Image: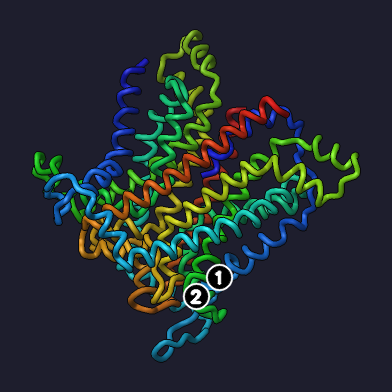
Amino acid sequence: MGRRVLAAHAVLVYAFLYLPIGVVFVYAFNGGRQTLNWEGFSTRWFGEALRDDTITGALRNSLLVALGNAVVACALGTMLALALPRMRARLRVPIDALVTMTLVTPEIVFGIAALVFFSHAGLELGLKTILIAHVVFNASVVALVVRARVVGMGQSFEEASYDLGAGPLATFRQVTLPRLAPAILAGGLLAFTFSFDDFYTSFFVSGAGTSTLPLFIFSSLRFGVSPVVNALAVMILCLTIAAIVVAYLVLRRSGSRTATGI
Amino acid sequence: MEEAPALPTRRGRRRAGGGGLRYPAWLALPALAWYGAFFLAPLGFIAAYSFAELSGFAGVAFTWNLENYRYLLDPLYGEVFLRTLGLAGFGTAATLAIGFPFAYWLARYSRARTLLLLLVVLPFWTSFLIRTYAWLIILDPEFPLFRALDADLLYSTQAIYIGVVYNYLPLMVLPLYAALERMDWSLVEAAGDLGDNAFRAFRRVTLPLALPGIVAGSLLVFIPLTGEYLIPAILGGNKTAYTGTLIAQQFSEAHDWPFGSAIAMIVIAGMTVVLVAFSRIAARGEVASG
């Protein structure tokens, strides 16, 4: 019943989802100074964006924070994911609730809370505070991704490793870590993109002198849409999409290996 | 957010025989310390701030009274809260109305499902800010589509609503799809064979089984929308205030942190109520569908 109608609806949904992204892509290559006034294909705005010190500075900050955040979030999230499955329910349920809370609390609430906290704790606002705040929700993201894999893995390899005389650390390094690596990498890539794209949290805890790419874009929108911002947006989109596709491929490959190999 | 990474493990779970790896519980400590210091403590701080008041130029006096909350009873703020609820309610209803038939099609009829699902996830994981501002270009009266329609939606309430539906649609589709993907479609056919018409079969079979997805999707859309700031700021031209707008104002312009904290506490309280209510609905649904 209505199968054709549903398919047509789906086509419209995809068009709706990709229209804005497509529009930004197309207009980023408009040579004219005014976004909507098409004056021929040109890549000049990409060059202008990359020559602007404000933009490259913000880009550097965004990359630094996103990388540092991904590393710390991977460490914390993976440890948490390893600890949770075997924990008693009395401990696990509240921790699960806490992890969920870090992900669903409206970001603006977390942003202002972090701002109030940092200013009381005497931490100077800047890259460090942005990184600390980003790790809070990204550790949860990594924990969720890695945990899905930990639960699905079974422990016969680990038991074999213990039987052969390896200690917990050696077992982790030689057996568990290689098997978890794809999930950790995928979680880390997600943490990287979430941090790289984050606006709300950075907006409140960045302080006066520090900018990231989303903050730069937001402040430049006060003067309307500009071709430089379009070009910048296209570069950001390409970077995030690449990271996500890599994460997806890594997870999928490791998934099929699990099915056949273990 | 939770659904996509879970994809590859479904195969593995069958083999695992429950349990998973045996690693010590203390491994959770670093993450818990981080949550405690940088998530719970900050929330505690704004809870305390919400009972404080401004003193002098930039100081805060912890007077422990309800002054900030009483201030919020002003009809002016009541209007903002209602408008925010309206926005969140509309966003939830609209994404459900658009997302359900879509997720249904994806789960029941589509081919190359994983790829099609990735195409839904992809925009959701790219910059929220860029996807929002893209609508500034599309809604511009000079944009070919609207020049033809002679419509000017830029910086209007409609623009905000479009932006909301656009940004939150994937968050609704993913849990809906996850629920519908587990459906046994022969049940629907059986209901038809036993004399149910299509509508009745949908209501009695599909809907109860899809309920957990509907609940999860509604939560993921409704809760963040109660604190939405970016979409009204960009697409509404910051002309209409929502709860998120009020909070941001207290911290970026007015510098009234105690009052801003009180508004944030209202959002947290609302979030708690919604979470509890929805988990009740989900629990009842599970009982009903056996």
Q: Is residue B111 left or right of residue A223?
A: right
Q: Is residue A155 left or right of residue A65?
A: right
Q: Based on the displayed image, in which of its 4 quarters is residue B15 positioned?
A: top right
Location of residue A152 with respect to A200 vertically, above or below: above
Q: Which residue is mark 2?
A: A116
Location of residue A167 with respect to B52 vertically, above or below: above
Whether residue B101 is visible, yes or no, is yes
Q: Which residue is mark 1?
A: B42
Chain containing mark 2: A
Whether residue B79 is visible, yes or no, is no
Q: Based on the displayed image, in which of its 4 quarters is residue A69 positioned?
A: bottom right
Residue type beneath disc 1: Pro
- The residue nearer to you, when weighing A196 against B283, is A196
Location of residue A249 with respect to A25 vertically, above or below: above
In percent of width and height, residue B162 lies at 28, 46
Q: Residue at x 53, y 14 (%)?
A: B186
Q: Residue at x 47, y 85 (%)?
A: B60
Location of residue A219 with respect to A85 vertically, above or below: below
Numbered disc 2: secondary structure: helix
Quadrant that contains the C terminus of chain B: top right
In percent of width and height, residue A157 lies at 80, 36
In percent of width and height, residue A108 lies at 43, 63
- The residue nearer to you, when weighing B179 against A19, is A19
Q: Is residue B256 left or right of residue B21?
A: left
Numbered disc 1: secondary structure: helix
Classify mark 1: residues with Cα within 10 Å, few (<14), some (14-19) or many (20+). Answer: many
Residue type beneath disc 2: Val
Residue contact between numbered discs 1 and 2, judged by CB atoms under 8 Å:
yes
Chain containing mark 1: B
